[in-house]
Structure formats: structure tokens, C-alpha cells
Amino acid sequence: MKIRGERELRTIREKGTKLLYPSELKITIGEASCGLSRGARIVEEGIREEVKRQKPGIKVGTVGCNGFCSQEPIVEVIAPGKPKITYGRVTRERVKELVQAAIRGEVVKDLVVFRTDYGDMLDERIPYTEQVPYPLKEVTEYHTLPTIKKQQRYILRNSGVIDPENIEEYIARGGYSSLLKALTMKPKDIIKQVKEAGLRGRGGGGFPTGIKWEACFSAKGKEKYIICNGSEGEPGIGMHRSLLESDPHSIIEGIIIAAYALGAHEGYFYIRDGYPLAIKRVKKAIEEASALGLLGENICNSAFNFTLKVKRGGGVFVCGEETALIAAIEGRVGEPRQRPPFPVESGLWGKPTVINNLETMANVPLIISKGSEWYKKMGSKTSKGTKVISLTGNIKNPGLIEVPMGTPLREIIEIGGGAAGKLKAIQTGGPSGGVLPASYLDLPLGFDELKQAGSMLGSGGMVVIDEGNCMVDLTRYFTAFFEDESCGKCVPCREGVTKMREILDEIATGKGEEGDLAYLEHLAHPMQDGAACALGKTSVAPFLSTLKHFRKEYEAHIKEKKCPSGVCKEGMMK
Amino acid sequence: MSTITINGKKLNAEEGMTVLEVARDAGIYIPTLCSHEALKPYGACRLCVVEVTNGNVVSIETSCTYPTLEGLKVKTDTDRVKKVRKLVLELLLARCPNPKELKALGEEMEVKEAPLRMSLKNDFCILCGQCVRACHEVVGAGAISFTKRGNEKKVDTPFHETSEDCIGCGTCVFVCPTGVIKMRDVADATFYYPEGHDDLGPMRMMQNWQKELKLKECKACGNPWAPEFLLETLAKRINLPQTALDLCPTCREPKKK
């Protein structure tokens, strides 16, 4: 069947709703990479075996990641007339008991994490049940959890709820209704709405998406391309991977809308090869969408044609840079070239090209569906909407969260349950970002706010650092990361980062000399000016921001040969 | 046509010109290492940086790649620019302390040697990429390219094996600013293979790319003058008959009477 309009979409939506709200018992397992690494596949096999033995006929399915990384593997039980029950840290040994309880309508008390009374679609709220039976009343409801209360999950709305390999469940949650709406609009109006909404690129630069689209729209040439950047290269970050694995359709829907607005008929989805599950699920999603006529020729009877291809990347950090990404897709070495001309004028194969991060794309259906006025209300003065954040480091409950822009950093850490030890600093924006000391906790989340403080929002990684960490050691780690990831094209980055790492190594091993800090600064400032691309320019950010806020620690290493945190041991005084 | 200002001087630029080209035409000196008039702009050495004011935005950009946008203001010798150039030279001198060309540039910019705290290497290749680009863009052979990345980057043939695509034209040798790429023609290569080979005859040796090419002898004077493979490739590319390149340039010229 092909979707030609509202009617067909509604038919599929009804089918999908039956899957999400089944009339029989259904057990689902969270199977994104996070769950799989904690043994979700073993638990799934166990559940299937138990179901066969105890009561064949119970449906067993998979969903994506719901963001509670610390609770993986997660199993959910949906019984008709009852709230959805979520179990965490399920092991193979507990599976028998769990399936038994599910059949009897009981709850395994020590494994249960929360219950869910209703599901939030894009446009409406559908309850699982009207009444909550007695034993479940004692279990906390999902929406009243302190961690969830403070969040606003729009981009992650489907993650962990739907089966990422089933388009019907995505449509049941309100999916592809934005596309239908967009196809009735004029391309110019779509761009205007995105511009008015104040959407800014989520890849790290924070460039206004509407302005980028406008520039490409008015660029000369009929042939235009659209590229979705799914190359996440920063260490300690996994939110884009999780989104790709849990809800690929929301990104694809955004890409199709963007392509329609720009008049592009061909698009590329660039995903790093290190994410095999993400590639598999995106490919499946593209197949499913094509089968329903949401991709390909004459999309939804609108005479608009668009094909989307998956391009696998080598996972190089610099290939997240626009021009390097284009080079990689064209089959050349992934090295950035000098701008201007910008890709919106001359990009892939020399044609006007828009490159957007996948999270930016996932924001587009939201804006089209709810309007720019609604979208603008969320966020800070210059940064609108929500931001998915990957909360890691020394934090009690690491995981994926989504908060509106403008949320103070303190609240974000509270969502994760607070720092494991005494909070020392927060590292934002991946290696290219910077380190902010605990005194900056009241800073609101936003592109310009963090930039002014000497860090950056980046793609939304947040590493919580407690007192057990040495800032010199941390800087050394990030600088070594840049040394490893430098493409080697321009002199300041290729040679300069190595020289910096060498001196940082010396400082960390007790061989630091007086004047080393001045020497490092002498290297860092011209490197910021002189390097060819954003990777080179920001490679000095870890050093400059730690020096600004933790100069004393550097001095202790150099003058007293002491590491205040006791991390650097080699060559240090005891 | 557009008008830009360099160091306060108003200059006209033709369409498609870069800031560097306009500056050179006007006699304004900007040092370069990786730029070559026969090659496309690359922007790797960062020595040609200038301070550009485009609208309200002031930034440091490479003049060899920057287009001449209308109303652009360029300064070639601000403090920020000088600092970047100095750093580039310090870093290059730490990598290659010996090439004369680098030393001369260093003296010009008051950088005698790399700072004491820098670790030194003794390389001769500054990775400007002129050889690689010439081989791809001008010759069209594509025999060499960059391998590896970051500080381990180097110019090499694919998999460090004898290149089948190298035609022995020597363009890489000609464009190399530090002279690290070497080539030599020998009258009898047999000398280099003491065991088992006899009578190899005149050959061209591309030492960096492990390639040896038989030289063709001129039909008239008998002097070896160019690699056979090079002449075959050329003849094929421009549709010349096999015999067209039998004579060396000297014998091809009409004799003066």
C-alpha cells in the first residue's frame, strides 16, 4: 500500500496503535547498543524460551533505548487494561520469575523501576488504562519521576517506546503527519517557519538552520543535495547513536521535509561505520518508508521525488566537518577544504548542498507539526527548543536526557542524580568544548551562553568531573585525542597539537619547567587563528579552558611536582 | 570585477581571482610555501594568512584560497597575522631544521630556529602537497598521494609499493620546494644490479617512489632522452603515431644552416 493522503495514514496509524496498545500480553526488551552491551540479547532469548514453555502466544518485541542507561537491560510488560510496567537490570536468572508474574498479572517488586499510565503521541495523549490496579499504585508513575519531571522529551519521545524497525508504530505515535502537512505548504513557507522557530544546528556550530536553508534555496542551480550528518566522533558521547537506533524515522521524516523545502531530489545519510546497528536500522527504515511511498517518486501524491541513500563513514572525527564530509562522500580523502565557497553554494559534486546534523533534522517535524510559535516558547533568548544531552562521567545515573535550552547546568546534573563525589567541573561540548568549574553551575544551557563562558554546547555531551580527577591529566587525554584525529593537512594542527601534547606529558610526569605554561599559550593562541578547520582551531580549547579555571593545578605540577588529585603518579612527589 | 582593499590600497580584482593573486599583481608581498601558480589553491601551510574584514566579521584567512568579494578589506601584516606566520615557521623548522628555503624564510620573519622546548625531527618533507597535487592535477597520473594522517602523514605510493602509474615525468621533483624528491638518469643501470642482470641500459630512477623506467634512445643521435613509458602514455593521450616521438628535442629541431 502507498500512502497518498490522510486516509491511508490513518489506516496505518490504527494498525500501529494496536501494536503499541495490544489486546494481549506483550513483553518488550530495550535493544539499542546500550542495552545489548549489558546483555539484552541474552535476556530476550531467555524470555522467548520462557514464553514458549509457559504460555505460547505472548508477544515478544524489541524497542530502542529509553535513556535510563544505568538500568539496562530493560524489560517492559504491557498487559491490556493495566499500566505499562518497566523492569530494570534484568538478568537471565530472573527471566522465569518475570514471565510468570506477567502472566499472573503480578509485579516483581525488586526489579520494577516505574509504571507508565499513558503515552504521549506527537498530538495527543493515549492512556494505557483508566484505573491503576492496587499493587501497581505503590510503583512510581513514569511522568512523576523526579528525573522525568524536569525533562521535556520531544526528540526522544519515541525512543524506548516504539520498535525502531516497524514504521507502523512510528506512524501510530503521530509520525509522518508532519510530512503530509509540509507537502501541502509552499517550500518558502516551510523555510520561513524553521527560520522563525529559531532552530539552530545541533551538530556543534549552532548556525541558524533557517538561514542555511534560505541560502541554499536561493543558490543558483537546479540540482541540489541534502546530507544528514550522522558521524558522531567525540569520545564519551552516544546520543546520536541512540537516536539512530531507537527512532530513525523521526530523522528521515525531517530529511524529507528539508529536501522538499530546498527542492533537493537526492540525499545522503552519512553514518559512521562503527555504528552497525544504526546503519542496519536506518536502512530498514528507508526500505519501509519507500514501500509506503514516503520516499521515491511522487511522494504522497505530491509530484515530489526524493531518494535517500546511506553512506558509511570511517568514523574519523574530522569527517564531521562539512567539507571533509563532502570529500568523504565523493570518495576522496576526508580532509576539510577552505571555505568560502560554503557548501550551500558549492557542496557535493559542486552543487548547492545543505548539511544538517541528525538531531537538527529530528527537530523539523516537530516545528512543522506544532508551529514555530509553540517551538519558540521553549528555550533561552538565543537558543530555542530542546537539547538531547548525553550525561556521563562521575554522575550517579548516567543516561540520555532532553531538556529545554536555558535549563541551568545545576538542574541537568540533578536530573542525573548529582555527582558521584564532590563536583569539581563539567566538561561540555566534547573535546572541542571546554571545562567549566563548579562555580558556573547556574549558567543556562545555550549556544551563546556556554560560548561566552569559554566552553561550547557542541553536540551535547556533558561529562561530570568530580574531585578525583586531575585537570592536567584530562587535558593531556583530550589533546592526545586531537593529535590522533588530526588529518595532518595544515601545519598548526598537525605539528602544533603534537608539540602541545609532548609538553603536557612532561608536566604530568614531573618534568615540567618554569615557563612551560607561557610556551603553551604561545602555541595555543596562533593555533586558534591559524588552523584550517574547526577541529584544529578548537584543539587548544581543553588546554585554554583548564588553564583559565585551574591554573593552580598546573602550577602545582610544575613547581611543587605534586598532583593535587593524586592521579599523576609517575615522577611526582608523594 | 570587484574592488578590494589591501593594506589601505584600493585594488581591482577580476572575477575568480584570489586575494593572493591580487596582492601579487600589485606587488604586495605575502610569503607562501604550498601555493603554486599551476596548481589549485590548497591552504595547508598557513603561511599566506591575512586578516580579512568581510562586513562586520574579522577573521584570519588564507589569502591563497580566499575569493575577492566586493568590498573586502585585507591587512597583510597585523600582529595576529605575524604570530601565525611565526608559529608556522617555528613548527616547520622543528620538523625540518635543514632545508635552505625554510631557513631563508625564517630569517625573513626573525625565526632563526625552533624554540628550545620543541622536540626536533630531521625531515625534509614539509607536506605542502605540491608533488601530490601536480601528479593528480597537472600530470593526471595520480601515482603518489598522502598516506596516514596527523603527524604520521607522508607522501607515498599506494601501499608503499612500486607505482604502476608513475610515468617518470619528474614533475614532482620539479615542484618540490625543499628538494627531498630525487630522480636520476643513469647511462647503464646494470651497475646497480650486480647479481643476475645484464645489459639493462639507460634508465631513469625515481628514488622516492621505487620506480625505474627504461629510457628511450633517440633514433638519430642515440642519446637516451625520456622514459619509454612516459612517451607511450603521451602518444596515447594526444593520439600521436608511435613514431612521432622517436627523436629527442635537439634532433627534432630543424638544423641551422
Image: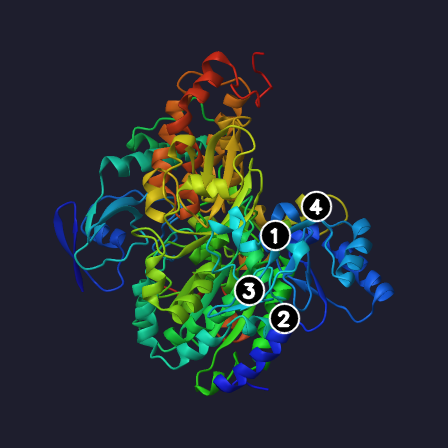
Callout 2 crowding tier (Cα within 10 Å): few <14, some 14–19, many ≥20: many
Callout in the foreground (1, 2): 2
Furthest toward the front, the residue is A134
Amino acid type shown at disc 2: Tyr
Q: What is the C-alpha distance between the residues marked 3 and 1? A: 69 Å
Amino acid type shown at disc 3: Gly
The residue at which mark 4 appears reads as: B193
Q: Describe the element under mark 4 as helix, strand or loop.
A: loop
Instruction: Name which residue lies at 52% across and 17% down.
Output: A511
Callout in the foreground (4, 1): 1
Residue A465, label in figure: none
The residue at which mark 1 appears reads as: B211
Give left or right: position of A354 versus A82: left
The residue at which mark 3 appears reads as: A119
The residue at which mark 2 appears reads as: A21
Callout 4 crowding tier (Cα within 10 Å): few <14, some 14–19, many ≥20: few
Q: Is residue B99 above or below residue A83?
A: above
Q: What is the C-alpha distance between the residues marked 4 and 1? A: 14 Å
